[in-house]
Image: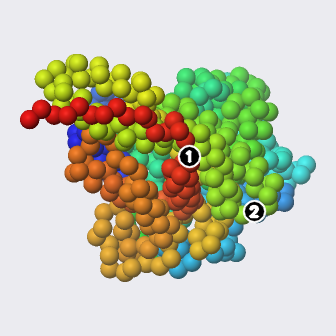
Amino acid sequence: MDKTGIIVVSICVLLLGWWFVEQNKIAQAQAHWQQTNQVAKLTAQLTATNPSAMASAATVATTVFTATTPVIFDTNTPEQTLTLTNGRARYTFTSRGGGLKTVELLDFPETISARWKGQIHHSDSLSTLNSHANVPVLAVLGDQSFIGDGNFILSAANGGVHAEKFLASGLIIAKQFQFSSNFLVHASISLKNGSDKSLLVPPQEIVVGTATPMDADDTGQLWGAMWCDATNATDNPLPTFSGGGMGCSRGTPKPEIRAGNGNVSWVAAHNQFFALLAMPKEPAREMVARTVTLPRFADAGAATNAPAPQGVQAALVYPAQTLTANSTIEREVVLFAGPKELRTLAVIGEQQQNHAELVMNFGTGFASFWGVGTFFAKLLLSAMNALHDLTKLGYGWVIVLITILIRVIFWPLTAKSTRSMKKMQLLQPEMAALKEKYKDDQQKYMQKQMELWKKHGVSPMSGCLPMLVQMPVFIGFFTMIRSAIELRGASFLWAADLSKPDTLFMIPGMTFLPFLSTPEGLPFNLLPLMMVGVMLWQSHLTPPSPGMDPAQQKMMRWMPAIFILFLYNYSSGLSLYMTVSTLAGILQTKLTKNLQDPAATPALTPAPKSKK
């Protein structure tokens, strides 16, 4: 690699690290944008395009933005709640909106980050979905005439829950909820015209739920709204609403995101490890997603001075319809409210025939190496779970074991690459002689050089081949560890949670280091430091490429230090994988160099003597 290539690679790595931090800043900077500007902007647009529409602006604004307004229900009426459990989750229903207020997952305790509490511990609280949301899951929203006071009558019925509301127009909204296995709730929503006249039912939104951060460590990259057309899924993470991108490529903030054209198979409000996923029996017309402001985390120390965290509320959208006298519209929705476990979601996706497993969000396009990384992410996650079930080892040791297995699989390729690089080094005198002999004929020099490489069976690309082949595996491991709920709360040695950084303590006052510091100070994360240490060791053991000048060699040897910028505060599981993989690579290099391979030492011809 020449000097230009090294500079380009270095800049790309730096930009990647900056992108991780910048996206989080964008999301926080837009914390209150939607709440203060949405209705005003819509009203201004209506007035500019059609002054007569001003009279109905308030009604339209209510229709479009009700989901983000916390006071859509009449709070003068006492709230009625009903709580049921099926052994895996605790479901709390509310009369305000007639839906699921919260879902508490009994097998998943809430965890507190080491950054704010000194150590990660399992609290008495449970991981709760739709926590602090303005509206319940499966609330039906529309304009004010459709919502009324927003209060339903709740009752337990047939092992489930029944919610019903009578509107002055004669419309009756009834909901029936039944529980099933695999964190599923079967819901039936009916809109019945109880009058003897036709009723125009306005556009409706069936709220899927609100994606919220699980703790102060969660970033806007990991929660948002997804939707699927039964084949492909599209994610809208939190930064999308604030424009996304970076620098001059940053887009315009969006008050909401709409998608679909009668082909919405499912919509999800998800965070890093959990999802609320609504699967209608018949495809919905559209999906819509908006941001909502959430309460600050009480356990986040100095971070309480930062903007309040944002959630993303998602909904299924249905068009206006006319109901004839005594007729009924029935909508059936299967709701998944639980952990993003690939095995569970794959079963649901097969049953519903809608690829529900795509909510794992392993990435698409470049983010997943155009599908190759996604393939390896699924393969590695399945292999990790299989090894865990077989060996009964903790997930930390399973990561160590699967990393070694990957290295063993790639051993022949790595060994061949090492031998080829050794041959290239031994051929350096002949290559230098050729360069001197044909210094005035570059084309002839290249021809002779290729003949020399062919004669001794070496290739200049052999050193890069193992890296290129293993890149999809690395991307797969990266996305798998980011999404694997199995690692949440899993400990390994001093790392209390492999899904988080292995922060041992905070260094107060050091809040000024870009990429590394937090509002509390500089976290001391040991695994990333070990990772970079062994990577630097490996780079110093790797022989330089032929023809590389000393300055370039020095730069290449210290390039691994750049990884500290954007992996320092990432999952300790990834740092563990890269540390073990690099150590295994060093061992492989030493073993390969010590092997006696006659073909590794080419028979060199004497270099021609230079004429004096």
Pointer 2 local density, CA inside 10 Å: few below 14, some 14–19, many at least 20: few
How many marks the image carries: the answer is 2
Position of residue 415 relative to residue 303, above or below, is above
Pointer 1 local density, CA inside 10 Å: few below 14, some 14–19, many at least 20: few
User: 97 or 279, which is in the foreground?
Assistant: 279
Look at mark 2 in the image and give the residue it sits on.
393
Residue 383 in view (yes/no): yes
Amino acid carrying mark 1 in the image? Gln
Residue 584 lies, in percent from the top left, at: 56, 55
Viewer-side label of 1, 2: 1
Look at mark 1 in the image and give the residue it sits on.
596
Which quarter of the image is occupied by the N terminus? top left
Residue 14 placement, left or right of 172:
left
Residue 458 lies, in percent from the top left, at: 43, 31
- Mark 1 touching mark 2, by CB under 8 A? no
Residue 200 in view (yes/no): no
Residue 218 lies, in percent from the top left, at: 50, 59
Q: CA distance from mark 1 to mark 2?
A: 37 Å
Residue at 37% of width from left, 65% of height from top? 516
Label 1: state its secondary structure: loop
Q: State which quadrant residue 587 falls in.
A: bottom right
Position of residue 418 relative to residue 229, above or below, is below
